[in-house]
Image: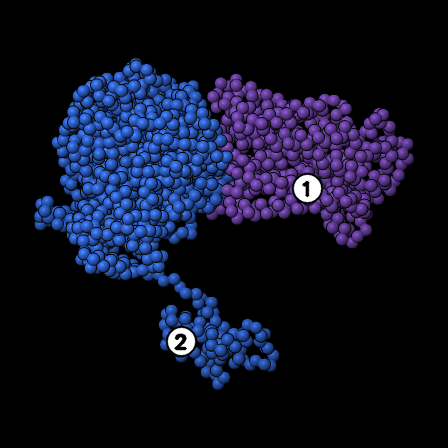
Chain colours: A blue, B purple
Amino acid sequence: MSAERKPPGVAVDASKLEALRGREYWRSLEELARTEDFQEHLHREFRVPVPMDGGLDRREMLTLMGASMALAGLTGCVRQPEERVFPYVRPPEESVVGEPLYYASAHLHGGYARGILVESYEGRPTKIEGNDLHPSSKGGTDVFAQGFLLNMYDPDRSQTLTERGEIRAWSSFIAAVKLALERDRSAGGRGAGLRFLTGTVTSPTLLQQLQDILAAHPDAKWTSWEPVGRENAMEGARLAFGEPVEARYRFDAADVVLSLESDFLGTGPDMPRLVRDFAARRRGKGSNRLYVVESTPSPTGAKADHRRPMAPREIEAFARAVATQLGALPSGVSGVGASAAGAAPGNAPDPFAAAVVEDLKAHRGASLVIAGESQPAHVHALAHAMNEALGNAGKTVDYTEPSAGAPLTSQSATLPELVADMAAGKVGFLVIVGGNPVFDAPADLEFGKAMDKVDLRVHLGLYEDETSRLCHWHVAQAHELESWSDARSMHGAVTILQPLIAPLYDGRTAHEVLAAFTEQPDKTAHDIVKDYWKSRLATTGGGADLDTAWRTALHDGIVKDSEFKAKDVRVDSSALEAKIQNPKSKTEAEPAGLTLLFRPDPTVWDGRYANNGWLQELPKPLTKLTWDNAAMVAPSTAQRLGLQTEDVVELTLDGRKVLAPVWVLPGQSESCVTVHFGNGRARGGRVASGAGFDAYALRTTGALWSGAGLQLSKTLRRRTLATTQHHHSMEGRGLIRSVTADQYAADPRIVAKLGEEPPGPTDTLYPKLPTGSYAWGLSIDLSTCVGCNACVIACQAENNIPVVGKDQVTRGRHMQWIRIDRYYTGGLEAPDTLFQPVTCMHCEDAPCETVCPVAATSHSAEGLNQMVYNRCVGTRYCSNNCPYKVRRFNFYLYSDYTTEVLKMVRNPEVTVRSRGVMEKCSYCVQRINHARYAAEKENRPIRDGEIVTACQQACPAQAIVFGNVSDPDSAVSKVKSEMRTYGLLTELGTRPRTTYLAHLSNPNPKLGGAARPAGEGEHGHKDDV
Amino acid sequence: MSDGSDKGKPESSIPQPKPGDTGILAPGYTFTTLTDKLASIALSRRTPFVWFVGAAVGFMLSMVLLGALSYLVIRGIGIWGVNQPVGWGFEIVNFVWWIGIGHAGTLISAILLLLRQPWRNSINRFAEAMTIFAVACAGIYPAFHTGRPWLDYWLIPYPNAMNMWPNFRSPLIWDVFAVSTYATVSLLFWYVGMIPDLATLRDRAKKMWAKVVYGMLALGWRGSARHWQRYETASLLLAGLATPLVVSVHTVVSFDFAAGIVPGWHATIFPPYFVAGAVYAGFAMVLTLAIPLRKVYGLQDFITMRHLDNMAKIMLATGLIVGYGYCVEAFMAFYSGNTYERFMMWNRMEGPYKHMYWALLFCNIIAPQLLWFRKVRRSIPMLFVMAMIVNVGMWLERYVIVVVSLHRDFLPSSWGMYHGTFFDKATYIGTIGLFLALMFLFIRLLPMVSIFEMRAILPEAKVEEEEGA
């Protein structure tokens, strides 16, 4: 190229190019392309046909070719994404690529910690498991603990700090706070206009921070508001004991339990432990007996041996009657109890109450009375009095100091004060630390309106939600799994929350927001928490070994000996009687009309999980409803009002109106309509939008849990509700076999007799399959399963199961691998409710395997019915031929292949299924193989209990047992050898490896408890599409 | 052969049929006039206006099919109404329906040939064409109903590096063999049977392109005795091959269901009952096509009342077998004492799809009883209505078998409903369009009535045979 006639452009710039490196080089070539002579050159090259004859000599030809070479570089001139790859020079301790690590942390439920272990692949948390060292978990989890992982990866989360929608730096937030505080200082400096609003706070560090700030600004106030508060329980304890204490129930020691609308098996901060204890007792010798009175069906009611639907006021009367008869109220019949006992029609004493009383009396010291949060304080007090009278205190229940910060007991009283101050213009600076009060505060407070009067409003939240819209500053909150923090369980056990991942976005913790109000405004959450605990551990005798104590606490997920000791408190029953003589007049003057009950949503809770696809799509335990909430009415009420499921009605309470679709719910109290709050988000994110209606719009300070005087008028509209189960009767098929404990004791073969005789193992044309060294099998105990859905979400998280959306659920295309079938038996008004989790049965003679034309589903030597995704062409024949209908098909491309952040939540051990393939429960084959690798490395067989499936791990009731059925000593073999074991549809010759332990109920014989075995000729509620 | 038609014979030698019955060929035809008339449809006659209308409709609906299938491949099977528990819907209903329709063609061409039923000669050609087009339409469904249609070839056993073979236990694999064999044999049979006529068209064609195309298709047929001898052998062999297919194809299709364990599928009566149903549906479709065709093209002389009457009788007979099948199904459900079978039957009669079941019984059992009456069989409008009723009834039958059995099987918790979506319907209508389009092309371009076989039933053919003897 050393010609005299230099090629235009290229050669001229060659020297320049030499001087440039890397990205600059490309950029300058782009610039080069814009220079005039190069443009001309381009033009010649591409537009004008090069005259080969005459006009162009060899040199020119070469020149042109050279330019082409230069241009070839231009085609690659897109700006390359910036990627940094850092190979480990020295890998972090214990980290092996592809091997998950587990870290202890906590999930906060309404502020209370439940211990979890978080599985982490190369720094990505992918799965939540229970922490068996933690007293509130004991190894189990609930749906929220399983599901909240997805919130962290939610692409709709707010990602940066904003001021009026503009992105700001953290330093400018600190400056803004400083400015506001300085302005206050110049105006007296007592922080008169400063208000903090939090949820329930159990974090010792945060409490300390708040205390410090309040001490520095004596006129500042801190209010807390939790939509599902524990105020009634606290107030009840105060009534009973004179001080707020937290009751610690021991269901593993209770033979007879009376629940006054307490859904302890369904929801609540301590649910995993309570379910585990309850299940342990139920499994034990001589089953326990559970009586439930409630207005609206709950999982606890479903597990009851005797359940009575009652209106709220009847429950109160019932509680009084029982308390009186138990002698918990000293004046006996002369008290309010007598008149209230008139709830039973006529003068005849209620035989149900009498039987309950007798049963409780017969089990002094081994019984329990528990009241639900929806019950007024004096019912809680009555429950405490009853436990005391029964001698249960100290045996099945003890009392600890509450672990939540002070304002807990009077949230519904202090929140109106705050709002009144706001409306009066007394609040200059409102700091909302987490929570979404504009959405979930009682409607009568009109929190949003009052916000306008506040000069400076700051909101810390995971989402840009209803509240952040009305705030000047919105601080993107770091998710619990991204934060350093700490929290107490219900009974004080402290967990240090450790981040599993650096914040995905520019998230901040509550600690950091509060730090902005202190002298060290940019102190990190880690330092704040660690400093606090250093001082604490030092004072509590950690001594020299602070670091070990800190590390042990992090490792175990619990600070040693931090759980509160039982307090010695006594019920002053005569004082109590005086206090509850005149219960709130509201309940006395209850009109005869309908009562509206407010309950937290079983899947999206108070609304904080509304944008969580796993939880939105999770069928609610009793209704099997997804993506919506509904106004639930009793069948008789529906008939009286001419309502059908999906009819839209207008609910009017105290002049507030809301439109809601109807759901006819068997077992609902006739005079009550129940709504779940949490859905109907106005600014909840893409998943939440369009899901359900906002029941908070009717919820007022006076009617937090129930409001009388509901008016209900039918509209002509209908709303499609997506449910995963349309038929609720077993049609006389022995699917869930339920017998009483006595029947079973008398003849253990009764369970087998409830079904047809299966054909023998040789009654097949196909040759026997080869057997391996293991034979995997699963057993599910229907007695202890509470239908809580934890297994469903655990499976969804473990196995990368996609969310399909309401429309697809409506079309019957939900994807969860486990479904919990719920059947009703008995009458519509008070049916028995039975749950049955259905996984793949891994049939030994699987009908699906023979029909697959491409052998995409085949049998392993260990008895797994395997699904080979990449071989599947999607004929759906296997699904048709599966009698259990456990196969799920990807009708569309359900898995999200495009959203980057959602890729991180996936389990790298499990294939992400594409469109057009079948999938189903694999018995967590990845976990089996994981154990196999470990065993083979050590040259030993896989130990019993080494493989824990995701569902088994999550199950708070320990109803699921998995293992090697060819080993007679394995846990699963022992469970399966019980006479309660039966297989589903074994008469078809499928020989399922998943078997069930029949449901044992323990009815009181005095209540006509000779319940017929379920599975025989009963017809329940039918609600067909 | 091509010039054999020149020999005319006096009309008087044609035997007179019974009064009121034209027999299987109207009187008055000679080799020449018959050949002229039939060949002219493809060659010289003005294309009737109805043809343009019909072909246009057919093509437009084919475009609907194209659109529906393209969208299916782009979006996925979810655009159809299939779900859990109803994994198969319209697509399998339509597949079985189309396959069934095809059966009449094979029955007419093969079995009636072997049984030496000369009345088949005027209807076998388009009945065979109907078979092929119906199989083509049918084939679309299983090919596209899979979740990943581009991998359908995995159903074919072929040697591969992974040594991965299909699962020969699966009825769907049997289907692949049965249907592909059926399509191949039918196509061969149809084409081989057409060669002499293609030669006639070649010889009579005036236009250059027609001469060339027909000439190539005629494979050099010269009508020599050796050709005829080979033709007869081939034709007989193919008939022999096709005859078991009449029984086997729908038997195998019925195995798709009978080999499953779903109540309503798992029944031993399925194979015979499906075959009878297929013939039933097939003859209904032949009638549906023949009645307008003979009117439009003036073929009343060739497709006579005798033909229609015979076909109506076959419909009646097969309809009764199908009716017997329904009765046995219901009886066995109750007699078996099996909860699931009993429920299945009760659900058909009383469940959410009961209107379908009762409509099916009306269409397939009640209404066709009118065919006992000669007056009905001889009334063209009535016959046409009957045929349409049976077409609908047979579609409903498959819907009841496929969908109604699946929607409520063993576990009530999984029961659901199925409704065809817009795309289900568009695909169905689209295949009808494709069928029509192919049929209209065939009518226009190929001899829809077998010319040489019609000549064989002319009296003069008989005379020659006698003379030759």
The answer to whether residue A523 is visible is no
State the mark number for residue B379: none
Whether B1 is drawn above or below A770: the answer is below
| Residue B69 visible in the snapshot | yes
x then y, percent, for residue A635: 42, 26
Residues A836 and A513: in front is A513
Q: Where residue A655 appears, x then y in whole percent?
A: 39, 37
Which quadrant: the N terminus of chain B? top right
Give the alpha-carbon distance from disc 2 to disc 1, as whole Å.
68 Å
Viewer-side residue, B33 vs A136: A136
Going 50% across and 75% down the picture, which residue do you hit? A39
What chain does mark 2 sit on?
A
Secondary structure of the residue carrying tag 2 is: helix
Q: Residue at x 30, y 48 (%)?
A: A423
Q: Is residue B7 left or right of residue A413?
A: right
Residue B172 image point, x, y percent = 53, 36
* In this rendering, position of residue B360 left or right of residue A65: right
Kindly indicate whether the residue at mark 1 contacts the one at mark 2 (C-beta within 8 angstroms).
no
Identify the element where label 1 is drawn: helix
| Amino acid type, callout 1 | Leu
As drawn, the label of residue B436 is: 1
Q: Residues within 10 Å of mark 2 (few under 14, many from 20)?
A: some
Q: Could you say which quadrant of the image residue A611 lies in?
A: top left
Please give the chain letter of the residue carrying mark 1: B
- As drawn, the label of residue A17 is 2
The C terminus of chain B: image quadrant: top right
Res A599 quadrant in image: top left
Q: Residue at x 52, y 26 (%)?
A: B351
Q: Residues within 10 Å of mark 1 (few under 14, many from 20)?
A: many
